Amino acid sequence: MSLRLAMWSGPRNISTAMMRSWGSRPDATVCDEPLYAHYLTLTADRRHPGYDETIAHHDADLASVIRWLTGPIPHEKQVFYQKQMAHHLLPEVELEWIDELTSAFLIRDPREMLTSLLEFIPTPRVEDTGLPQQVALFERIRSRTGLTPAVLDAADVLRHPRRTLALLCDAVDVPFREEMLEWAPGPRDTDGAWAPFWYAKVYETTTFAPYKPKDEEVPERLAEVLAECERLYRRLYEHRLR
């Protein structure tokens, strides 16, 4: 058994907690947003928290990163879990290499995602959420393979972590491991250089937190962004594992 699992997410979708979960498997190794440095070099006008640290410490050569992602699984493990941000797939990024991976998709209710994202990016655009890129990649994979990739909704994971993770493991043809439900607190060597700016809450966790609906409202100035995000979210939500 060997699996290179690319989990295509957007920001603030419990993607780091999911990386912690897979990193707890003794048969797995993980990587954290491997396309981020390349993305930042091409979007320097939008300075994300941790921009300088990311550029200084991570490989921005797209071809080099792709060779690593599609090559031998590091550390002689059986599973290579790749936490991927879909918005890092800029239009100039060719997608053929993704065919060599098993792709899955992690989504979150746009109202909850956007109110969380506002803590870091005050004026997010639709493309900053990763939803357009997720939908495009999802449809591309379905068209090329005739198969429907696994889709996980963050609320389902938080409400029923064991059941939802077991469904995901079944969908990607690996056994579920109980170790996926717990992890040690704090940072990891596999965390990106941006982690101190984004992962403070995750550092305190040891498992998936119980789901709590957010009652914050998305600002009216983002009404059009929210409406488009909700449209895209629904296209993926109907295919979620359940």
Image (tube, rainbow, N blue to C red):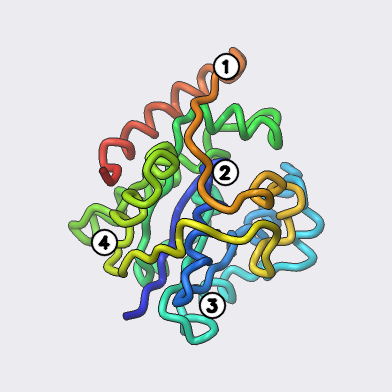
Q: Classify mark 3: helix, strand or loop.
A: helix
Q: Earlier in the sequence, mark 2 or mark 1?
A: 2
Question: In the image shown, does 82 or 224 lie closer to the viewer?
Answer: 82
Q: Which one is in front in this view, the residue at disc 1 or the one at disc 4?
A: 4
Crowd rating for badge 4 (residues with CA inside 10 Å; few <14, some 14–19, many 20+): few
Q: Earlier in the sequence, mark 3 or mark 1?
A: 3
* Amino acid marked by disc 3: Trp
Q: Classify mark 1: helix, strand or loop.
A: loop
Q: Which one is in front in this view, the residue at disc 2 or the one at disc 4?
A: 4
Name the spot of residue 206 as percent of width and height, x first. Answer: 59, 53
- Inter-mark Cα distance, 2 to 1: 18 Å
Q: Earlier in the sequence, mark 2 or mark 3?
A: 2
Q: Which residue is mark 2?
A: 11
Name the spot of residue 71 as percent of width and height, x first. Answer: 47, 81
Residue at x-position 37% and y-position 43%: 160
Q: Earlier in the sequence, mark 4 or mark 3?
A: 3
Q: Which residue is mark 4?
A: 170
Q: Is residue 143 left or right of residue 210?
A: left
Question: In the image shown, does 153 or 186 lie closer to the viewer?
Answer: 186
68 relative to 151, above or below = below
* Amino acid marked by disc 1: Glu
* Amino acid marked by disc 4: Asp
